[in-house]
Image (tube, helix red, strand yellow):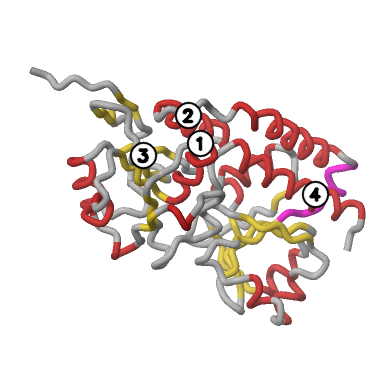
Amino acid sequence: MERQTDWEFLDDRGHLATAQRRPAKAVTYIQAGATLWDHGIRPTAVFGSNHDGAGPDPVKAGGLPLDGIVYLGSGTALDAEALLRGAPDLVVAVTYGGGQVYGLDPEAAKHVEERVPLVVLDIGQGQSLAAVRARFADLARALGAAGEVAMEGPLARAEARLRDQAAVGSPESRPTVLALSPASADGAYLAKPYSWPDLRELAGFGLDLVDPQGGPSTNWFAADWSDIGDIAPQVLLVDVRANAHPLDALRSNAAWRSAASGARIVPWNPEAPCSAGAHARFFHQVADAVEAARQDPA
């Protein structure tokens, strides 16, 4: 006799996760947990990626109340037993394409899926922000959330504001926007914007994003601070995750000060919650910086 299930969800790998009742104890990748929190779903525990350490990254965590949610670790400290220690009834993870579960060893992911439902959502470069938001909203509703309807209006206004900013003046007069992740006191990784859904969206609004070419990576281009100074961006989107070289440590760095001279700096989280509220806040921050750069060019 086939087992009857009352809950199911088809994830972005094409895997059908099933349970006898709606899951109530979800363990999630920290970005996924922050997204579900924005929808009113509280994870019981979260885990990090190989880039994270023994504690949760507060930037990736978004609005999660970290003092009340267990952090299970990351990297080599994260195995199937660690994920299942609190007897969760669902694990939610992300993939950057190809079905590979981000942050989990493939064998660990396999063992987890043999014991509890595993839902994996694709947030990779092949997805639009709207598509990713919709998939997380689908999952949140399946877990009992009412939805994030209240934030759709603010998101639409933030998007319209960016389009308006991009339409001011001639294309040549648009402030140049560069996204980067500080690597060390000597340089940074420049983001290739069409590999990042949020940056690709900014370019789609008409903003002038620097698109570094070359190098072995599809996501980043390694550069010295002097290279960035030569670009002379007017708006800098700076990765502020815990694995990036901290901005505070750069403030006394003459090369950084020269590279960032006159630029408006916007904190950038490449792993922001995939929610309307988080995207609206980021878009408004970028719009503020672009508007300021246009009104008072360096």
* Label number found at residue 40: 1
* Label number found at residue 288: 4
Task: Quote the CA–CA distance across marks 3 and 2.
Answer: 18 Å
- How packed is label 2: few (under 14 Cα within 10 Å), some, or many (20 or more)? some
Give coordinates of residue 106: x percent, y percent: 25, 51
- Is residue 176 one of those drawn in magenta? yes
Q: Give SS at disc 4.
A: helix
Q: Nearer the viewer, mark 4 or mark 2?
A: 2
Residue drawn at point x = 23 percent, y = 22 percent: 5
Circle 3: residue type: Val
Furthest-top residue in this view: 1
Q: Which residues are magenta?
A: 169-177
Give coordinates of residue 69: x percent, y percent: 42, 53
Q: Give SS at disc 2.
A: loop
Which circle's residue, 4 or 2, is located before the other in the chain? 2
Which circle's residue, 2 or 1, is located before the other in the chain? 1
Which circle's residue, 1 or 4, is located before the other in the chain? 1
* Label number found at residue 115: none
Q: Is residue 185 above or below residue 69?
A: below
Give coordinates of residue 116: x percent, y percent: 23, 39
**Relative depth, front residue between 145 and 290:** 145
Looking at the rendering, in which quadrant would you find the C terminus?
Answer: bottom right
Which circle's residue, 3 or 2, is located before the other in the chain? 3
Looking at the rendering, in which quadrant would you find the N terminus?
Answer: top left
Q: Quadrant of residue 227?
A: bottom right
- How packed is label 3: few (under 14 Cα within 10 Å), some, or many (20 or more)? many
Q: Quadrant of residue 77?
A: bottom left
Q: Which residue is mark 3?
A: 120
- Is residue 72 one of those drawn in magenta? no
* Label number found at residue 145: 2
Give coordinates of residue 6: x percent, y percent: 27, 21
